[in-house]
Image: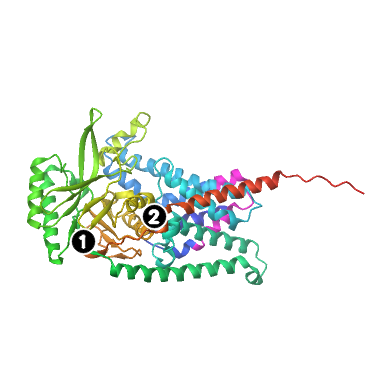
Amino acid sequence: MQSYFFLLITAVGWPLLFPPLNLGWMAWVVLIPLLWAVQGLRPSEAFRRGWLAGCIAHLGLLYWLVGTIQSYGEVSWSFLGFNGGALMGIASWFLLSAYLALFWGVFCGLLNRFPSVPTWLLAPPLWVALEYIQSIFITGFPWENFGYSQHQNLYLIQMSEVTGVYGISFILVGVNALLFQILRDWKGLQVFAKQKELRVTLALLIFLHLMGYVRIQKIEGMMANAPKMKVALIQGNIRQDQKWSPEFREETLDRYFNLSREALQNQPDLLVWPETALPFFFESDELWRERTVKEIQELGLPLLVGSPSRAREDFRIHYYNSAFLVSSEGEILGRYDKIHLVPFGEYVPLQSLLFFLQPVVPGAGNFSAGGKDQLLVMEKLRAGILICYEVIFPEEARSRVKMGANVLINITNDAWFGRSSAPYQHLSMAPFRAIENRRALVRAANTGITAFVTPTGRVLKETPLYEETSVSDEIALLGVATFYTRWGDLFAGLSMILVLGVILLSLRKKNHVPRNRKSD
C-alpha cells in the first residue's frame, strides 16, 4: 500500500509542473516517488504500476479534452439518458491517457528488467527514447513532454538549440534518478560527501545555466543588429459556436478589420490574423473575397490570415486548413496548407475501421493534409507557418527554418479549449521552437493567448483569454543556423542508441557464464 501512495504522489504532482500552475521546480524531484514505488518489483508488475501512475498523471493533465469534445464534437446520440458528447469526451480522455501511460509503464518495466544497470545511467536516455517514440509514433502526441516543465527557466532551456527539448528531459530525469539512488542508499549525511555523481551533476547544472546566460546575451546582440519588421497580431475573440454561422460572417469581418484599423497607429509592416479567421473559402467565394480584398486595400497593409480552402483532386473535393499571405493590393502571394493534422479533430484516421467516430469530426472539420512545406514570402519576410498544434512538433518548425524561414508564425484557434489549462499549455511549448532554431515566433490566436516569442524564448505581450484586442511589436529576422536546425533530434537518436547499447551489454554480462577453474 505504501508503494501505491508514492506512485500517487508522482501522478498527482505531474500536472502541477505545467500551466497554469507552472510548478517547474517540482520537476527535479517528481519522479523520485515513482522510482521508489517500483524498485525491486518484477518487470511486469513495475510496468503495471508505471502505467497506472502515467494514466492518473495524464488524466490530470488532459482533463480539458472532455469539455472540448462535449461542447464541439457535434455528437447527437445519447445512451441510457447520458449525453453522447459527454460520454465520447470521457472515453477519449481515458483512452488517450491510457495510451500515453504505456510509455511510463515501459519505462518502469525496463528499469526493473535490468537492475544491474545504475538507475541514473539508464533512466535518462530511456525516458528520452520513449518520449521521442511517443512524439512520432502514428501521428505523434508530444503534448507537454517533461522538458516543457522548464519553459520559464530561460537560462537552462537555451541548450535546446543543441539537444532540442529532449535534452531538458534528459537532465531532469537524470537528477531525479541520482537523488533516488542517494536516498535509497542513505547511510547518514556523509553520503553527500561521497557522491561524485552528485558533485558532477551540480557542476553541470551550474555550467548549463551560465552558458544559457551567455547565449542569451549573444543572441540579443545578434537581434539588435538584425533586420527588423513590425508585426500586428489581431485577436478577434470569435466564439466557436458563432464562428461558422453565415449570419455572423459580416460581424466577424467587421471585428477583425476594426481591430486592424486600430493597430495602424503602431505603424506595422504586416497584419496577422488567426487560424480560420475568415469563415469562408477565401480563394473560391468571390463575393466575400471581393469584400475582404477591398478592405485590405483600404488598410494598405499586407495580411497573413487563416482560411479554409478546397480543391478537386482524385475526383473528389479536398478541404484544407490554410494560411494565405495577401499583399496590400489584395493579391494572394502564397498559400500554406496545414500538414500535421489533429487526429479525430481534423480527420479520422483509419476511417474504414473507425467509422463510428465520424460524427465527432464535423465540429472541427474533415481536412486533408497539405502536400509539402511552403514558405510565405514577401520582400524581406520569409515566414514559416505553423497552424495550431503544429507548433508542438519540433520537426515542423525545423523543416520551415531549413527551407530558409527567418520568422515562425503560429496561427491558432484555441476557442475549442474554453477557459481551461489547454491554451496556457499550448503556448508553453512555443518558446522551445524559437530557441531550437533561433527565430522569432509570433502567435495569433482567435480567443488567446496571442503573444510574441523572441529567439531567446522570452514570451512578450501575452494577451488575456477571451478579449478583443491587438498587439504590435518589432521582431528581429535572424538567419543563423543552429546545431538543432542542422541536425534535428540527433540527441534523441543517440539516447535510443545508448539505451540499446546498455541493454545489450547488460544481457551479454548476464548470459556470460565463466568456466569453473580446475583445482590443483
| Camera sees residue 300 | yes
Pick the residue in front: 448 or 59. Answer: 448
Q: Amino acid at mark 2?
A: Thr
Instruction: Locate residue 512, reporting x and y percent.
Output: 73, 45
- Residue located 28% across and 37% down the image: 368
In this picture, residue 374 sits left or right of residue 6: left
- Residue located 65% across and 62% down the image: 185
Is 509 above or below relative to 315? below
Residue extending farthest to the right is 520
Q: Which residue is mark 1?
A: 231
Instruction: Locate residue 458, reporting x and y percent.
Output: 33, 65
In this picture, residue 186 sits left or right of residue 165: right
Residue 197 occupies quadrant:
bottom right
- Residue located 46% across and 49% down the image: 132
- Residue located 20% across and 40% down the image: 309
In this picture, residue 513 sits left or right of residue 319: right
Q: Secondary structure at mark 2?
A: helix
Q: Which residue is mark 2?
A: 485
The reply to whether dot 1 and dot 2 touch (C-beta < 8 Å) is: no
| Camera sees residue 238 | no
Residue 319 occupies quadrant:
top left
Q: Marks 1/2: CA distance? A: 24 Å
Residue 282 drawn in magenta: no
Image mark for residue 425: none
Residue 29 drawn in magenta: yes
- Report crowding for label 2: few under 14, some 14 to 19, many 20 or more residues within 10 A (C-alpha): many
Instruction: Locate residue 385, reporting x and y percent.
Output: 27, 51
Range shown magenta: 28-49
Q: Secondary structure at mark 1?
A: strand
Is 297 above or below relative to 359? below
